[in-house]
Image (cartoon, rainbow, N blue to C red):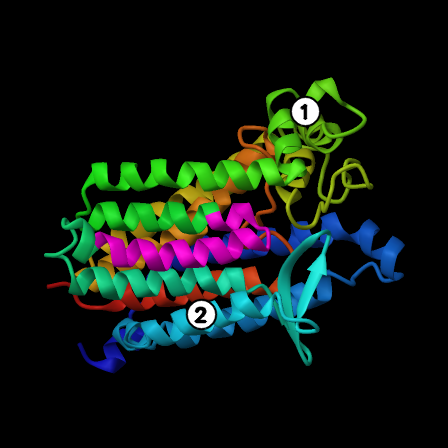
Amino acid sequence: MERAEIINRWDYTLLLIILALTGMGLVMVLSASTFVAEKHFGDAYFFFKPQLVFMLVGLALMLILKNVPYRFICRFAYVWLAVALIGLVLVFVPPIGRTVGGATRWVRIGAFSGQPSEFAKFAVVVFLAMSLAARREQLREFKRGLLPHLAVVGLVAALIIIEPDLGSAVTVITISAVLLFVAGARLWHLLIMAAAALPPVAFFVMRHGYQLKRIATYLSPWEDPQGAGYHIIHSFYAFTLGGLFGVGPGAGRQKLFFLPEPHTDFIFSVVGEELGFTGVLVVSLLFLLLIWRGVTIALESPEIEGTYLALGLTLIIGVQAFMNMFVVTGLLPTKGLALPFFSYGGSSLLMNFICVGILMNIAAQERR
């Protein structure tokens, strides 16, 4: 297909979905962060201004990558994977690594600061798309086909867990398992590996007391309403107070130091209070539409490599979005996961736009 045709060919459905999510997300970051920013930094727009900049940079990246052949990006799969692994190691190297709230998830080099785990999700998906397409015939064999991929995914997930960041590790493992299954890995092989992973996960949970507390709070938040259950209970309050149409943008009260990180992990609770069930439904439907469009693009890809890549990139956004929504509504134990296009944070927002840009390039390819 001619390059000019690819440049002029747009997936307008996907573009409209992304613009709607981005616009709503920017408004909600402004609403959710104003009081926190004013109290702690003396500037009500302390979080909004960088988020706006990241959004503009992200849109530019999306437009650029829309015109970069996805095969070219897959060609550097091992480079992306190496960069991700180096980044995940650097978080433990002072003074490059930064510890915030007991978790060492950030690196700072000069003016640059980011979470390597966000890039690691992308690197794993690109690696799997390239490798699975090349080894489809071997994948049903455990040693030659499945084990090498599990070793790479396990290494990345282990480095993320050590930070500790269980939410991102679960996201990486979930996306990888779906791609391996779709590519033809035997289900019983995957189940055996999942069973083998349970003891180390249990050890991790037992070693970190706060993880056990999170599970106990998930099972019965009302047993400690002023302690461990305080934040999730106020998340419930936010959705209850929102009713059908919400109290209005900016008028929510649970963000006034009741919810933890209302502009990041619990921003969906602010959506529930200020936009009500209607807003929650709209946001959920937009993410479902994004997943539907991503899966459609994967099925219509001209090559199997593009199919795996499109599916993986869609899952990066979709899995994280619904895990975040399940957490703040009490359907999953509390984990630190951003809501794509909504939560404050440059690393997550930029990676979301990068994923969408590559999806658009796959969509622009001619079907065979």
- For residue 93, the mark is none
| Residue type (three-letter) at the residue carrying disc 2 | Met
Q: Main secondary structure of the magenta part?
A: helix
Whether 4 is among the magenta residues is no
Q: Residues within 10 Å of mark 2 (few under 14, many from 20)?
A: many
Q: Quadrant of the C terminus?
A: bottom left
Disc nearer the start of the sequence (2/1): 2
The answer to whether marks 2 and 1 mark residues whose Cβ atoms lie closer than 8 Å is no
Kindly state the secondary structure of the residue where label 2 is placed: helix
Q: Identify the residue at image location x=68%, y=29%.
A: 242
Along the line of sight, which residue is nearer the eye, 81 or 314? Answer: 81
Left or right: 173 with respect to 340? left
Q: Is residue 144 above or below residue 221?
A: below
Along the line of sight, which residue is nearer the eye, 98 or 332? Answer: 98
Q: Is residue 110 above or below residue 201?
A: below
The segment highlighted magenta reads: 146-169
Kindly state the secondary structure of the residue where label 1 is placed: helix
Left or right: 259 with respect to 176? right
Tally the numbered discs: 2
Q: Residue 1: horizontal and vertical position, in percent?
A: 17, 76
- For residue 62, the mark is 2
Q: Residue 67: horizontal and vertical position, in percent?
A: 34, 76
The span from disc 2 to disc 1 (Cα, nearest Å) is 37 Å
Along the line of sight, which residue is nearer the eye, 261 or 82? Answer: 82
| Residue type (three-letter) at the residue carrying disc 1 | Thr
Whether 161 is among the magenta residues is yes
Residue that mark 1 sits on: 240
